[in-house]
Image (tube, helix red, strand yellow):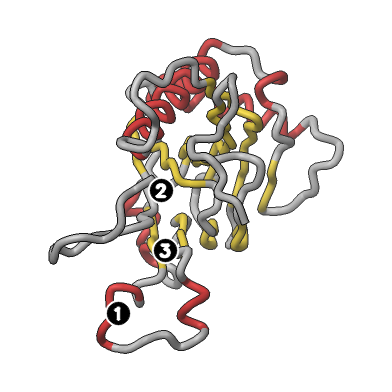
Amino acid sequence: MTPGLAGGALQQHWPVPMAVHRFAGAAEVNPVLVRVFNALRATDPTAAAASFYASADDLLTRVDLPEFTALLQFIAAALQATAQQANTGVWPAGRHGLQLELIGVWFQVQNGAAFHDVHTHGNCSWSGVYYVQVDPPAQRVAHPQWGALNGATRFYSPMFPLLGGAHIDMGNAWLQQATLDVAPQEGDLVLFPSFLPHKAMPYAGERDRIIVSFNAQIRAPAGDQLFRYAGT
């Protein structure tokens, strides 16, 4: 177990790890994915003629293309690196055989001021969003109503509910910045813990905002318990 507090230095506990990775193959892969996703949407009998569309989370079994495989390999490598860094000092030394599994991969298409309201992801430890297509930054932020928030991904602090209880004064000013807005950029992958509330802000642009989202589990074959349970 982690030792208790000691000394006079400031300590930060329970931080929220996040990471952004840049896909070097985006320029070649993304246009192919746009065509494939548009075709899947066009042939989906359940798709409504609306400005927002989300596919089923079964792309792992429905898309068999080298470009999609390249994206998945990039996502897996980024997840492995980020999870290892986030768990430095927590994963036991010499722990081997951890298994990473993408348990759901889907795409979303958004335009015409559509948005995806606040939500979290379940049954996984990590989630992510990969930006396949969106208007260029200067064009996107020129929107007269939303500006820089046009198509942004907004994350909410897990301590956000505390603000509703008015646990606020100048002593915890650091707590009061309760949101983080990430600007969409084609080829960027944003990784975050699945418990973190987030939202796709309204988007309107010349091109659709298209993303790939996914959930991931990292499991140990012999069990995931790191610390023995204390008696109660």
Looking at the image, the residue that sits furthest to the left is 8
Rendered position, 149 above or below 110 = below
**Residue 27 occupies quadrant:** top left
Type of amino acid at the residue the image marks with label 2: Pro
Residue in the picture at 46% in, 21% down: 29
Which sits earlier in the primary sequence, circle 1 or circle 2?
1
Residue 167 visible: yes
Element type at marker 1?
helix
Residue 63: x %, y % from top left: 66, 19
Q: CA distance from mark 3 to mark 1?
A: 26 Å
Whether residues under marks 2 and 3 lie with C-beta atoms below 8 angstroms apart, the answer is no
Determine which of the numbered discs, if any, sits on residue 149 in the image. Answer: 3
Of residues 61 and 55, the one nearer the viewer is: 61
Q: CA distance from mark 1 to mark 2?
A: 30 Å
Label 3 vs label 1, nearer the camera: 1
Which sits earlier in the primary sequence, circle 3 or circle 1?
3
Residue in the picture at 54% in, 62% down: 202
Type of amino acid at the residue the image marks with label 1: Asn
Determine which of the numbered discs, if any, sits on residue 172 in the image. Answer: 1
**Residue 140 occupies quadrant:** bottom left
Residue in the picture at 32% in, 23% down: 24
Of residues 198 and 145, the one nearer the viewer is: 198
Residue 108: x %, y % from top left: 62, 42
**Left or right of 201 on screen, residue 1:** left
**Left or right of 40 on screen, residue 82:** left
Element type at marker 3?
helix
The residue identified by callout 2 is 184
